[in-house]
Amino acid sequence: MAEPTTQTAAAEQETAAEGVDKTQQKEAAAESAGGGAEKTEENGGSAEADGGALGLATHEEELTEEEINTVRDCESIGGDEEFMLMIIELLADGLDEKLTAAFESFPKDDWEGVWRQAHSIKGSSLQCSLDVLGNAAMEVELYFKKVDKDGETPDKALMTKMLKKLAHESRRVQNSTARLKAQAEAEGGADE
């Protein structure tokens, strides 16, 4: 697919997907036009390297207490701290495999493979009220549904942004899981 002109690319990407963050669309337009958007903390970038062969975030950012409390208060968990940790840990353990599969499908233009992994992450995350991760996965899923419905070819620059956001939120969940587990073990050791 030939690269469209800068103005055409920006116009197409502005309307490419309903519900996709406008900031991400503008960054994708700048990148596809060859300009490359500067990564800042405000636009989802990191002062640290994105890192890893798959572009996964390597920084130590974790879920906020408010995000953790949302999971803790989830009806299916009912405030059970041990059960909450087990659920988040199970989810976190499967994230690398799902993200790896999505990132491996992407360069092959295996859009169904990317969609399946995003769908799986979305379902698992939203089931236990991990909204930040579930919403990032849903963004990928909804974009693919729209592109498929309209018979379009997915915009790779925009997809890269969305997948990196999904990887970033996944890493936050994994980092939080390690901290929560260590905290629970320390509190359990103090009770003995």
Image (cartoon, rainbow, N blue to C red):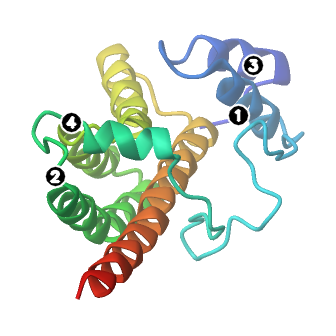
**Viewer-nearest of labels 2 and 4?**
2
Give the camera-side residue of 155 and 130.
Answer: 130
Q: Residues within 10 Å of mark 4 (few under 14, many from 20)?
A: some
Task: Classify residue 135 as left or right of residue 175.
Answer: left
The numbered dot on residue 28 is: 1
The circle on residue 95 is none
Tell me the element at label 2.
loop
Look at discs 4 and 1 and give the one toward the viewer. Answer: 4
Give the residue at mark 3: 10
| Nearer-the-camera pick, 106 or 61 | 61
Q: Position of residue 81 (x, y in %)?
A: 22, 57
Give how far apart the Cα atoms at labels 1 and 2 are.
42 Å
Q: Are marks 1 and 3 in contact (CB under 8 Å)?
A: no
Look at the numbered disc 4 and give the secondary structure of its residue: loop
Q: CA distance from mark 1 to mark 3?
A: 8 Å
Vertical relation: 8 (above or below) 39:
above
Residue displayed at 66% across by 14% down: 14
- Residue of label 2: 80
- Amino acid type, residue under disc 3 in the picture: Ala
- Disc 4 designates what residue? 74
Q: Residue at x 82, y 32 (%)?
A: 30
Q: State if disc 1 and disc 4 touch (CB < 8 Å).
A: no
Alpha carbon separation for disc pair 4 and 1: 35 Å
Viewer-side residue, 121 vs 67: 67
